[in-house]
Image: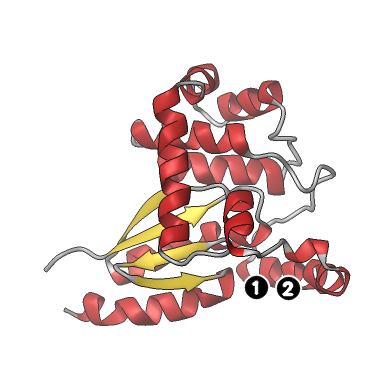
Amino acid sequence: MNTPVIEFFWDPASPYTWLAATQIGALATRTGATVSWRPFVLGKVFEATGNRAPATVAAKAKYLFKDLGRWAALYNQPLNFPKVFPVNSMTALRMACAANEAGEGGRFALAVMRAYWVDGVDISQPDALVSAMTAAGFDGAALFEASQQQAIKDVLRANTDDAIKRGAFGAPTFFVGSTMFWGNDRLVLLEDALRPAAQG
């Protein structure tokens, strides 16, 4: 039996992506799936689809803060809204692509999102980002250097283009084969879809 793959398109600028990231590992274990961590540029997805961040809509923003708190409590996970929001996550995403190449994509994703959504690190600033990732056990300087290479930039662009082509309009976005699931609150549907595979 083939092992199902969950493609997780993520951008650390999204709070719901952080919440989903804290749960996806256990979900994959329960269903016998593996996770393919695919960094993508959420801002470019918004531009391509005419979507925009909920925090830019006053009524949604008011609800957003309460909703995030409820989800964090449900998951028993920390979430501290950072002082710098929204944040330019481009360098972090490129470093994530470099971490993927080194087989550390999942660990990097969780570390960089924790740095931003728990510790309040301004991940738009290279020095702060490198320092935080070094503290998390990575060679932050090497990942930053790799992030400046055109090949890594092309990977991020290709991930973003692929997500848009397949219908993504926000984050987090998950694919199992051709089936798309959008949002932290769709994890229950994603797991349900994987249950037949887990049951053999």
Q: Secondary structure at mark 1?
A: helix
Residue kind at label 2, given as amino acid type: Arg
Residue 191: image location, x then y, percent: 39, 76
Residue 102: image location, x then y, percent: 35, 30
Residue 158, relative to residue 10: is it above or below?
above
Residue kind at label 1, given as amino acid type: Leu
Residue 62, numbered label: none
Residue 18 appears in the figure: no
Residue 52: image location, x then y, percent: 70, 62
Residue 70, numbered label: 2
Q: Are marks 2 and 1 in contact (CB under 8 Å)?
A: yes
Residue 137 appears in the figure: yes
Q: CA distance from mark 2 to mark 1?
A: 6 Å
Q: Quarter-wise, where is residue 17 in the image?
A: bottom right
Image point 51% across, 33% down: which residue? Answer: 94
Q: Say which of 156 and 100 sits in front.
A: 156
Mark 2, Cα crowd under 10 Å, few <14 / some 14-19 / many 20+, is few
Left or right, 46 with respect to 64, comes to left
From the image, which quarter does the C terminus lie in?
Answer: bottom left
Q: Which residue is mark 1?
A: 74
Residue 178, relative to residue 164: is it above or below?
below
